Amino acid sequence: MRILFLALFLCLILPVYSDSRLGADLAEPMAAKLLDTFSIPEGSMHTFSAEETREMINLAADIHINVFELIDCIFRYIKPKNIRVSMSGDYIRNLQTDFDLGGDRVIAILCLDKLRYLETGARLSPGQTDLDIFLDSPAEKYIEIGTAFYETRFGFEKMAPNLFDNAYGITVKKLFITTPLTKLDLWAPGKGAIYTKAISRPKKWNLDVVTKKKNNG
């Protein structure tokens, strides 16, 4: 009987630990524990320091989640506390010395080379959305589903667990079709699906997790 119980237990936990990609659902408690240490007052706007940004990215690397899953975890923690946070593009770019943030695909979707800052969390001022991303200038990126055109402000009006919904400020051109991007669905750990208005089938991708570069442990 004990052997049967052990076998059933291993069947339950092995799928979780055999995949190096944890996913936002399992990562959220660990992200919340780290965010607790920042002591952000409820109802406030908080800008992550360079060190806090590093700690968040380091956590993502340690627990094997990607940048979008990390944003998802942050949002889940701060939204009920009526907190909004901002992350500097300069601070994130500087971390590329020590971390691979997910490869060309993730960097292209975030327009990291032109990123000024991103904000997520509670809506503390008129016009804010669940995720607002600000660029130095408009951007054009190839993201495999087509060529994406980004306005200087883009993002997602609504977020829910594993879902970035009601996108704005992003259009995708594929052949003769130009259509708004509508949502990003984190449909499995380390995976995402991009939806557009006019293209019926989403583009499903691996969205690689954050990793530490070998020369930095």
Image: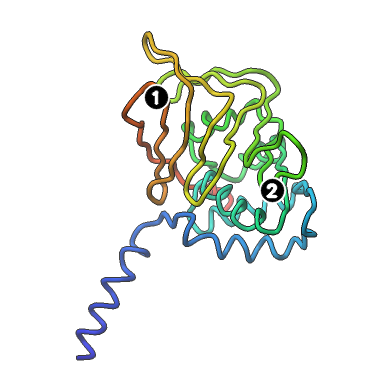
Amino acid beneath label 2: Ala
Q: Residue at x 42, y 25 (%)?
A: 197
Is 12 on the left-hand or right-hand side of 33? left
Marked residue nearer the N-terminal end (2 or 1): 2
Q: Position of residue 42 (x, y in %)?
A: 77, 59
Q: Nearer the viewer, residue 116 or 160?
A: 160
Q: Nearer the viewer, residue 142 or 151?
A: 151
Amino acid beneath label 1: Glu
Helix, strand or loop for disc 2: loop
Color encoding of the figure: rainbow
Q: Residue at x 72, y 47 (%)?
A: 85
The crowding category of the residue bearing disc 1, from other C-alpha atoms within 10 Å (few below 14, some 14 to 19, many at least 20), is few
The crowding category of the residue bearing disc 2, from other C-alpha atoms within 10 Å (few below 14, some 14 to 19, many at least 20), is many
Q: Residue furthest top?
A: 176
Q: Marks 2 and 1: which is nearer the front?
A: 2
Q: Position of residue 66 (x, y in %)?
A: 50, 47
Q: CA distance from mark 2 to mark 1?
A: 32 Å
Image-quadrant location for residue 95: top right
Helix, strand or loop for disc 1: loop
Q: Nearer the viewer, residue 32 or 49?
A: 32
Q: State the mark number for residue 156.
A: none
Q: Position of residue 71 (x, y in %)?
A: 58, 47
Q: Which residue is mark 1?
A: 144
> Exactly how many numbered labels are in the figure?
2
Image-quadrant location for residue 203: top left
Q: Are marks 2 and 1 in contact (CB under 8 Å)?
A: no
**Can you say which quadrant of the picture contains the C terminus?**
bottom right
Q: Residue at x 62, y 53 (%)?
A: 74
Q: Residue at x 73, y 53 (%)?
A: 83
Identify whether 28 is placed above or below 7. above
Q: Residue furthest bottom?
A: 1
Q: Which residue is mark 2?
A: 122
